[in-house]
Image (tube, rainbow, N blue to C red):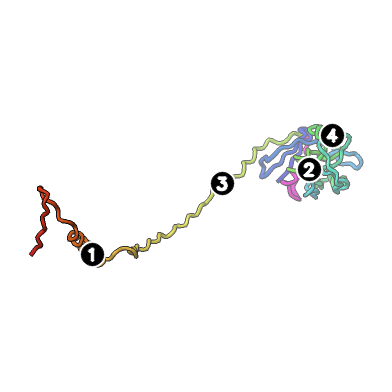
Amino acid sequence: MRVVISVRDQKLMLLENGAKVATYPVSTSKFGLGDFLGRMTTPLGYLMVAQKIGDNAPVGAVFHNRRFTGEILAPNSPGRDPVITRIIWLRGLEAQNALAFHRCIYIHGTPEEKTIGQPASYGCIRMKSSDIAALYNQVQLGAIVQIVPDRLPKVPKASPARTNNTLTVQVEKSKIQEQPASTPDSGSLTLEQMRMAGALAAERQKSQARKAPPAPNKDGAIVQNSPRT
């Protein structure tokens, strides 16, 4: 990642591999440009991220001498203008900005968000709390920061990262288990038992026929059944 800050545009651009990742409004010094002790100006040229402070601090956290005081300020809190939320401390890499680290030139959050987009700082690069928090998470120690007096360069936008939303589903083939052969019902009759039952039923029918009274003929006379010989 690399950062370019335009004094003329009052904007900061985050680049990756030469492509634009994001652009944020900023505020540079209201006292002009330069790198002089006691002048409260914004230095130009190539610098680097020397330190990052505020990893776990809440948004709006107030810092004094780079330490969290415990106070939290909302944007545009009246009468207050401290360093808040995050600090990215810069170190100069050229003769024209050699004093930047000693002068405590930061990229930092400010509660004076209404002044963002115009020169209003005392030498540092001011950003909105939400923007500095986002930038802080994307730049690493040693990242190059270039502050230029002219407009931001025209560069292509970075392509959005491709995400693989395809879920791979592994389907295991289950073995088909053969159903066990059905066994005969323990209560069902065997062939021999069926034969015996049939014989008993026939015997009962014969017995009932012998006990039945003789049937009358058409004249009302009772006809005796002659036994078979």
Element type where label 1 sits in the image? helix
For disc 4, the marked residue is 120
Q: CA distance from mark 3 to mark 2?
A: 32 Å
For disc 2, the marked residue is 59
- Seen from the viewer's position, the closer of residues 201 and 58 is 201
Does the magenta run of residues contain 137?
yes
- Can you say which quadrant of the picture contains the C terminus? bottom left
Horizontal side of 208 relative to 22 (left or right) equals left
For disc 1, the marked residue is 200
- Seen from the viewer's position, the closer of residues 59 and 187 is 187
Does the magenta run of residues contain 73?
no
Horizontal side of 136 relative to 68 (left or right) equals left
Mark in the foreground, 3 or 4:
3
- In this view, the residue farthest toward the bottom is 192
Three-letter code, disc 2: Val
Q: What span is in magenta? A: 135-149
Q: CA distance from mark 3 to mark 4?
A: 45 Å
Check residue 109 in the rendering and tell me which mark sits there, or answer none. none
Q: Residue at x 78, y 49 (%)?
A: 56
